[in-house]
Amino acid sequence: MYLLIDIGNTAIKFANYDGQKINLFLTLPSQNLIIEKHLLQKINVAFNKIGITWAMIKLICLSSVRPMWDGIIRDLASNHHLTFYQLKKNLVIDDFTINVPNPRNLGADLLAVAYASYHEFNKNDSVVINMGTATTITMVKDHQFEGTVIMPGLATASEALFSRAQLLQQFEISYEDAYIGKNTKQAINIGLVKGHGLAIKTLVDEIVVHLKNPIIVITGGNSYHFEQLLSNYLFDKLLLFKGLVYALHHNNLIK
């Protein structure tokens, strides 16, 4: 059993891989990492629910965009006498080219989902949309990472709107299949959710003309909002974890 961890700007996600299947079993707000004892308690409770013990874990593998918290996971591995691997640190990917001027600045999350798409789709060209705190649209062409587009994420845009417009009452946003709003809630849903989806579609349409028969895949916590609008895209909420698994396989760490 392998423990896979994704530290994002908004959430930290835990998944286990048994050699065949990836199971996402715990999602926490990222700020919960501040208190290590509480984090361990939550992991132990989640382990009990799915029938896992620390003795079953062979290693911990991390993708992180929050460097100040990486040490907490490293200590977690050390305290349980587990080998610790981290993408872009001691987990090397050398079968996939990063075609940007400063590859060291590339976020681990972007690398993980791009690497996953590279292997998951038989090394075909692809566009990977990752919807988190930021929405990123990444181009994978000819076996290499070609670049990305970064825009404010859906939740980020929503929080900015509600925090700055005093007369707007915050509500849970959702997709509206309409072209004009007849009330404030509908108008905001069209502007925020549908507008976000159409922006993604427009940017993707610009990218795909430079690719050969690309596969378009969307992942991340906010992707479920767009299952209707972007129904011709593939949806894969486990794509980042698949990237970690492929990286472990490439380094012969999974037998």
Image: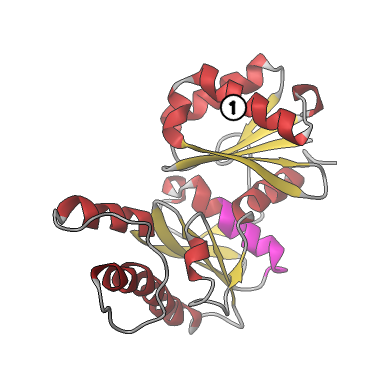
Magenta segment's dominant SS is helix
Label 1 SS = helix
* Quadrant the N terminus occupies: top right
Q: Classify 112 as above or below 9.
A: below
* Quadrant the C terminus occupies: top right
Residue 148 drawn at (x, y percent): 43, 63
Q: Which of 118 and 73 is in front in this view?
A: 73
Residue at the outermost left position: 166
Q: What residue type is labelled 1?
A: Lys
- The residue shown at (57%, 56%) is 113
Query: Which image quadrant is residue 218 in?
Result: bottom right
Q: Classify 217 as above or below 171.
A: below
Give yes or no for residue 129 being in the magenta stretch. no
Residue 58 drawn at (x, y percent): 78, 29
Name the residue that disc number 1 marks.
42
Q: Nearer the viewer, residue 151 or 188?
A: 188
Q: Nearer the viewer, residue 36 or 47?
A: 47
Residue at the outermost front position: 183
Q: How busy is the neighbourhood of tag 1: few (under 14 within 10 Å), some, or many (20 plus)?
A: some
- The residue shown at (41%, 60%) is 135
What is the tally of numbered marks visible in this picture? 1
- The residue shown at (42%, 46%) is 105
Determine if residue 101 is in view. Answer: no
Residue 34 drawn at (x, y percent): 43, 24
Q: Classify 24 as above or below 126.
A: above
The answer to whether 132 appears left or right of 54 in the picture is left
Determine if residue 178 is in view. Answer: yes
> What is the span of residues highlighted in magenta in the rendered image?
112-123
Q: Classify 137 as above or below 77.
A: below
Structure colour scheme: secondary structure
